[in-house]
């Protein structure tokens, strides 16, 4: 993204620089040309349509170019490619905790391979922070109580600054880290050292430990919906709305089950607010995502999911509902 953002920024600098120059040249020229002289009097001029149309149209066109160009860069930056590697980020006063989908945990350091799309699913366990990697030109607020997303693809090996860009308390300035971009081979070596197993496997364990699995069974007999194949799909709610089961939806179901109740089910799911840490919620989300992926389904978003390919899990779901 960096070169795209820079190109737009340089264009803005050139346009504004040229305008400034033009204004100053006119200022100096007119001051000299129309200076006060004895016997010469100014005369009043009443409007010029041609001139007004010109000075409205030209800036309008320039602004529209800036708008369209900015929108293209913005949408590109806000839309993670669908096959990105995922990293869960938890911010707290005053550190960054990062966990790879493969299970590696890091503090204030993120190792990534060169040339891979990396999508960060971020939340905060206390106040608002902001995930800022200046070299990659990405900055995204990290909020308590919900997920926000940012992505990048590093193109050059090296170590890059990671900052918190939102004043978050006394040691805000110490909330710094680094993004370590490795060659793929080096990255493999790094990856193979000390993992606790995939995040989704950790999630599966927590799922059993917290008793989620007693209600959410992989057949149709549970008191709660079968969670296989839920992620990325539209869900019908009791109040008539249909929402897409993305990361934020899963998170809300776990922490605040009352607000979005699945159609056809009793409000018996207890809230896990305060019982699970942000890391545990991330693991549960990763697990629920993995059991959608295991069925060979499009997992990233509803828009990429092909509706006709109904799996058994989905058929079970519609029977339950
Ligand atoms: Cu911070």
Image (cartoon, rainbow, N blue to C red):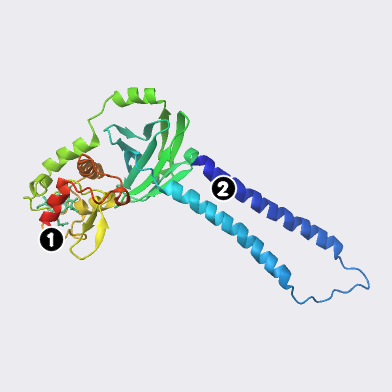
| Residue at screen point 45% across, 47% down | 76
Q: From where the camera sits, is residue 92 visible? A: no
- Location of residue 190 in the rendering, given as x and y in whole percent from the top left corner: 34, 24
Please identify the quarter of the rendering in which residue 99 is found. Answer: top left
Crowding near the residue tagged with mark 2, few <14, some 14–19, many ≥20 C-alpha atoms within 10 Å:
some
Secondary element type, mark 2: helix
- Give the farthest residue toward the front: 308
Left or right position of 109 against 281: right
Q: Position of residue 63 (x, y in %)?
A: 59, 58
Residue furthest left as drawn? 221
Q: Position of residue 154 (x, y in %)?
A: 44, 34
Q: Residue at point 44% right, 41% down? A: 163
Q: Closer to the N terminus: mark 2 or mark 1?
A: 2
Query: Could you tell me which residue is drawn at 13 percent across and 58 percent down?
Result: 321
**Residue 314 horizontal side relative to residue 248, left or right:** left
Q: Nearer the viewer, residue 73 or 273?
A: 73
Which residue is under mark 2? Answer: 8
Residue 51 lies, in percent from the top left, at 73, 68
Q: In this rendering, is residue 149 above or below 63?
A: above
Which residue is outermost to the right?
39
- Please state if 72 lies on the left or on the right of 245 as rendered: right
Q: Is residue 245 above or below residue 34?
A: above
Q: Nearer the viewer, mark 2 or mark 1?
A: 1
Q: CA distance from mark 2 to mark 1?
A: 51 Å
- Which residue has dot 1 on it? 264
**Which residue sits at x=58%, y=55%?**
65
Q: Is residue 298 above or below residue 263?
A: above
């Amino acid at each position: 993204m960096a070169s795209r953002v820079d190109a737009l920024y340089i264009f803005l600098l050139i346009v504004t620089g040229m305008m400034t120059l033009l204004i100053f040249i006119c200022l100096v020229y007119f001051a000299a040309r129309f200076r006060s002289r004895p016997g010469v009097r100014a005369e009043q001029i009443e409007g010029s349509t041609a001139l007004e149309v010109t000075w409205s149209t030209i800036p309008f066109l320039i602004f529209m170019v800036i708008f369209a160009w900015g929108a293209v860069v913005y949408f590109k930056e806000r839309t993670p490619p669908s096959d990105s590697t995922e990293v869960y980020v938890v911010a707290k006063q005053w550190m960054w905790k990062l966990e790879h989908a493969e299970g590696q945990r890091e503090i204030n350091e993120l190792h990534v391979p060169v040339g891979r799309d990396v999508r960060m699913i971020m939340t905060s366990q206390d106040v608002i922070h902001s995930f800022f990697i200046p070299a990659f030109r990405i900055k995204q607020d990290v909020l308590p109580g919900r997920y926000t997303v940012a992505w990048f693809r590093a193109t050059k090996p090296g170590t890059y600054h990671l900052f918190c860009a939102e004043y978050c308390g006394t040691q805000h300035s110490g909330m710094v880290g680094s993004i370590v971009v490795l060659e793929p081979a080096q990255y493999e070596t790094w990856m193979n050292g000390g993992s606790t197993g995939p995040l989704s496997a950790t999630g599966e364990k927590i799922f059993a430990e917290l008793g989620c699995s007693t209600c959410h069974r992989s057949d149709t007999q549970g008191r709660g919906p079968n969670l296989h194949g839920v992620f990325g799909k539209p869900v019908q709610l009791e109040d008539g709305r249909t929402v897409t089961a993305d990361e934020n939806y899963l998170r809300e179901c776990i922490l605040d089950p009352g607000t979005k109740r699945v159609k056809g089910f009793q409000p018996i799911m207890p809230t896990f607010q305060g019982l699970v840490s942000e890391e545990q919620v991330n693991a549960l989300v990763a697990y629920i995502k993995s059991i959608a992926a295991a069925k060979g389904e499009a997992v990233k978003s509803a828009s990429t999911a092909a509706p006709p390919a109904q799996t058994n899990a989905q058929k079970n779901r519609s029977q339950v509902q």
